[in-house]
Amino acid sequence: LQIAPALLNILFTALVGGLALAFGLAFGLGGQDAARKWLARGEASASDAAVRISQAQQANNDQARAEQYRAQQIQAQQAQAQQQLQAQQMQAEQLRAQQLQAQQTQPGYQQPFAAPDQMNRPTQ
C-alpha cells in the first residue's frame, strides 16, 4: 500500500497542528492554567518514554555484548577442541608408526601378504 505513508504523514501533521492551535488558543483566551497542566503532563510522559527507551536500548546493548562474549567463548572452545583432536590424531599416528617399527625390528618378522586383489594381477 503506497498510499498509507502519505496518509500517515498528513494525519500526523494535522494532529500536531491541531494541538498547537488548541494550546495557542488556550493560552490566549485565558485557559493558561489548564494548558500548563496539559503541557506538563505531555512533557512528563515524553521524558518517561525517553527514559524507558534509553533503558531498553541499554538492555539490548548489554544483551548483545553478552551474546557476543558467549559466541567468542564457544568459538574458542571449539578451536581448542579441534586442536586437541588434531593432537590426539597425531599421537595415535606416531604410536602406530612406533608399533610398526617395533614389529619390523623383531626377529622373525615377515612382511604381510599382498592384498587379494593384487595377487591375481599379472606381473610385468
Image (cartoon, rainbow, N blue to C red):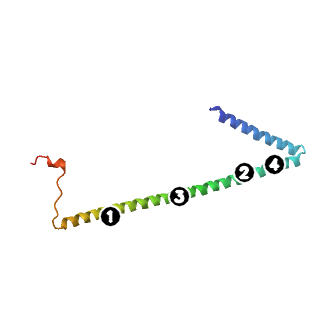
Asked if the residue at tag 4 contacts the one at tag 2, i.e. Cβ–Cβ closer than 8 Å, the answer is: no
Q: Is mark 4 on a helix, strand or loop?
A: helix
Query: Which residue is disc 2 drawn over?
Result: 49
Q: In this view, does 98 lie to the left or right of 34?
A: left
Query: Which residue is disc 1 drawn over?
Result: 91
* Front tag of 3 and 4: 3
State the separation of the CA atoms marked 1 and 3: 31 Å
Marker disc for residue 28: none
Task: Tell me which numbered mark, 3 or 4, is placed earlier along the sequence.
Answer: 4
Query: Which residue is disc 3 drawn over?
Result: 70
* Front tag of 1 and 3: 1
* Residue situated in front as seen by the camera: 117 or 93: 117
Q: Is residue 72 left or right of residue 119?
A: right
Q: In this view, does 34 lie above or below 112?
A: above
Q: Residue extending furthest right?
A: 30
* Residue situated in front as seen by the camera: 101 or 37: 101
Task: Tell me which numbered mark, 4 or 1, is placed earlier along the sequence.
Answer: 4
State the separation of the CA atoms marked 3 and 4: 46 Å
Q: In which quarter of the image is residue 24?
A: top right
Query: Which residue is disc 4 drawn over?
Result: 39
Task: Tell me which numbered mark, 2 or 3, is placed earlier along the sequence.
Answer: 2
Q: Is mark 3 on a helix, strand or loop?
A: helix
Q: Please name the residue shown 81% across and 50% down the image.
A: 41
Dot 4: within a 10 Å radius of its alpha carbon, few (fewer than 14), some, or many (20 or more) residues?
few
Query: In x, y percent, where is residue 57?
Result: 64, 53
Task: Tell me which numbered mark, 2 or 4, is placed earlier along the sequence.
Answer: 4
Asked if the residue at tag 3 contacts the one at tag 1, i.e. Cβ–Cβ closer than 8 Å, the answer is: no
Dot 1: within a 10 Å radius of its alpha carbon, few (fewer than 14), some, or many (20 or more) residues?
few
